[in-house]
Image (cartoon, rainbow, N blue to C red):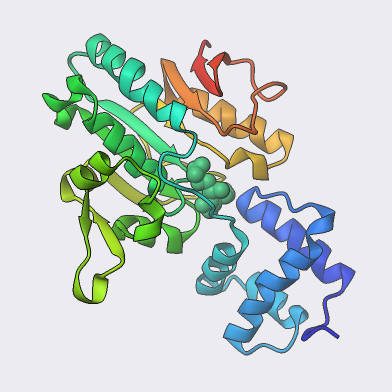
């Protein structure tokens, strides 16, 4: 027996609402997942039924809409996830781009940054690049996510020690501070890494506030949650926000096949804009 009644209509309605607000396509077999996550919000708001909860969302209650979105997103991430992307950035791309664009800064966007590990991995890779050392102020990293709670966590730069256990000891020493006292068991990203990044909340389905093009966009393990037309629209907007030869990194289980012809594949889910 379920704690709350959850009808087909509730499920259908919420699926449509989620797709409309976030682009996230919930598969039909994800009913239990949706039930479990939203039941948490019913408990938190003290409402008695999904019908009442739907009415609250549809009334345009912005605080609850934010909480709702935060329970719907899947935020799995880690430091240096898909390591080859960061090696390529450090060893090939940044030296090349710094050389090519001598008179301006390089702009990198972590779109769908979750709790920040991707953006900090980009910043650490940049600081590990010899050419960047003399030109730190030429690197700007923008990191955004739909989910306001993960953006807050990302901005804090504080992580449980086990999140960095598999990282190279040298890197840990160089870029993380060990917590003491009531912060024992935690680490904090050093300020020289954090200062390269600006975190903010942004829904990729809505207008973007950027007026300068990006050189590199990381949007990894995000489009996998969208249907094909939504992916196509988003990737087209990424192309439009990139420098004419800019780069797009996507997740290992994602592809731009059938999604966009504006990019060529360089290998290992790294793409370059061609039109
Ligand atoms: C699985 S995480 C990926 C994190 C990181 N990019 C990585 O690869 O480790 C997916 C992230 O996409 C975000 N997301 C989903 N829909 C979004 C949207 N419409 N706009 C912005 N971010 C979105 C989620 O909040 C979540 O944090």
| Residue 40 on image: x %, y % | 63, 78
Q: Is residue 106 left or right of residue 270?
A: left
Give me the residue at 58% from left, 29% from top.
235
Q: Is residue 252 left or right of residue 145?
A: right
Give me the residue at 58% from left, 63% from top.
69
Quarter of the picture containing the N terminus is bottom right
Vertical order, 264 against 66 (above or below): above
**Front residue of this view, candidates 46 and 60:** 46
Residue at far right of view = 8
Vertical order, 85 against 148 (above or below): above
**Front residue of this view, candidates 133 and 51:** 133
**Front residue of this view, candidates 24 and 254:** 254
Give me the residue at 39% from left, 47% from top.
117
| Residue 5 on image: x %, y % | 83, 82
Give me the residue at 34% from left, 15% from top.
92
Residue 195 appears in the rendering = no
Q: Quadrant of residue 227?
A: top right
Residue 208 appears in the rendering = yes
């Amino acid at each position: 027996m379920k704690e709350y009644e959850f009808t087909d209509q509730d499920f259908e309605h919420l699926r449509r609402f989620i797709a409309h607000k976030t682009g996230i396509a919930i598969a039909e077999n994800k009913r239990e997942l949706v039930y479990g996550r939203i039941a948490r919000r019913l408990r938190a708001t003290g409402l008695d039924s999904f019908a009442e909860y739907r009415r609250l969302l549809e009334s345009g209650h912005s605080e609850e809409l934010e909480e709702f979105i935060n329970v719907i997103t899947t935020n799995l991430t880690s430091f240096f996830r898909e390591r080859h992307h960061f090696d390529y950035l450090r060893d090939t791309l940044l030296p090349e781009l710094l050389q090519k664009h001598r008179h301006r800064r390089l702009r990198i966007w972590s779109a769908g940054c979750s709790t920040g590990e991707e953006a900090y991995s980009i910043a650490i890779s940049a600081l590990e690049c010899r050419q960047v050392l003399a030109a730190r102020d030429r690197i700007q990293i923008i990191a955004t996510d739909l989910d306001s709670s993960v953006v807050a966590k990302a901005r804090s730069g504080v992580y449980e020690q086990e999140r960095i256990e598999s990282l190279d000891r040298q890197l840990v020493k160089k870029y993380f501070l060990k917590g003491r006292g009531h912060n024992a068991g935690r680490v904090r990203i050093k300020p020289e890494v954090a200062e390269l990044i600006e975190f903010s909340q942004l829904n990729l389905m809505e207008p973007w506030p950027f007026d300068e093009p990006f050189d590199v966009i990381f949007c990894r393990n995000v489009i996998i949650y969208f249907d094909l037309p939504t992916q196509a629209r988003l990737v087209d907007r990424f192309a439009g926000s990139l420098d004419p030869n800019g780069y797009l990194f996507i997740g290992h289980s994602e592809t731009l096949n059938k999604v966009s012809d504006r990019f060529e594949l360089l290998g290992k889910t790294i793409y370059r804009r061609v039109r």
